Image (cartoon, rainbow, N blue to C red):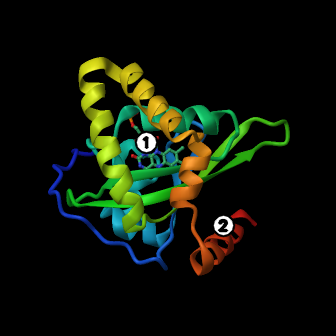
């Protein structure tokens, strides 16, 4: 299905902490399933989403390197938590923390990826937004190698790995964590 890229409005859709946006893709990243919440927030119909590459949600403010690193990890079968700014059909955006789950065939090949998203807390967006802005500026000048190097140095200066950085910043805590685990289990069974 031919989709026209929406123009960003700069308006944010604030997500409720009880909202879980779930999607499943094939190994290429085409959407094969989306829950009602994901459909609602995206602004697209289920028919528009199913069979479409996941970059239908890509916001131009997102540095390319974030997706590069994300794909590198999930293709290896590793889970990763990513903070992503998504674009809805209306052009409004919403920030999410995305937790992946990798589904494999009996012989160990990747069959599907699942993404579980919740609204990113304010404190997370406050740290990530300026970081991504800088990375995007660097990318425009020096390409993805430049933004990857900047991000590496950013973590080095903090003396932590990406996992530690994101766990510290964005892992759901308390009740939110319980809700998150429950939803993941529901979709995994
Ligand atoms: C399970 C899964 C979920 C994804 N969710 C998103 C998402 O919510 N937003 C997004 O921009 N990209 C998402 N992606 C990444 C896209 O496939 C794509 O790499 C990204 O949008 C960058 O697009 P581009 O390479 O065309 O620039 C997801 C990929 C997978 C496998």
The quarter of the rendered structure image containing the N terminus is top left
Q: Is residue 68 above or below residue 128?
A: above
- CB of residue at label 2: within 8 Å of ligand 1? no
* On-image quarter of the C terminus: bottom right
Disc 1, SS: loop
> Which of labels 1 and 2 is toward the front?
2
Q: Name the foreground residue: 70 vs 52.
A: 70
- Report the residue marked by disc 2: 184
177 vs 53, nearest the viewer: 177
For disc 1, the neighbor class at 10 Å (few under 14, some 14 to 19, many from 20) is some
Q: Residues within 10 Å of mark 2 (few under 14, many from 20)?
A: some
For ligand 1, which image quadrant applies?
Answer: top left
As drawn, 134 above or below 57: above
Residue 174: percent from the left, percent from the top?
61, 77
Quick one: which residue is furthest to the right in this view? 106
The structure residue drawn at horizontal position 38% and vertical position 33%, both measured from the top left corner, is: 64
x, y percentage for residue 85? 35, 53
Nearest to the observer: residue 69 or residue 39: 69
- Return the x and y of residue 139 as percentages of the image width and height: 30, 26
> Dividing the picture into quarters, in which one does residue 142 lie?
top left
Q: Residue at x 28, y 27 (%)?
A: 138
Residue at image location 29% in from the left, 47% down from the top: 130
**Does any atom of ligand 1 lie closer than 8 Å to the CB of label 1?**
yes
């Amino acid at each position: 299905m031919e989709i026209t890229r929406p123009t960003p409005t700069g308006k944010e859709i604030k997500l409720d902490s009880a909202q879980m946006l779930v999607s499943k893709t094939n190994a290429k990243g085409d959407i094969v399933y989306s829950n009602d919440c994901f459909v609602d927030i995206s602004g697209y119909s289920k028919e528009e989403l199913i069979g479409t590459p996941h970059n239908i949600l890509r916001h131009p403010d997102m540095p390319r390197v974030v997706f590069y690193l994300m794909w590198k990890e999930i293709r290896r079968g590793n889970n990763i938590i990513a903070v992503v700014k998504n674009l809805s059909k209306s052009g409004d955006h919403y920030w999410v923390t995305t937790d992946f789950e990798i589904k494999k065939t009996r012989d160990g090949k990747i069959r599907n990826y699942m993404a579980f998203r919740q609204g990113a807390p304010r404190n997370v967006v406050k740290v990530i937004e300026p970081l991504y802005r800088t990375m995007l500026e660097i990318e425009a000048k020096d390409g993805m190698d430049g933004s990857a190097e900047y991000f590496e140095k950013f973590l080095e200066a903090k003396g932590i790995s990406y996992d530690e950085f994101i766990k510290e910043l964005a892992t759901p805590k308390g009740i939110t964590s319980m809700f998150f685990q429950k939803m993941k289990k529901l979709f995994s069974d």
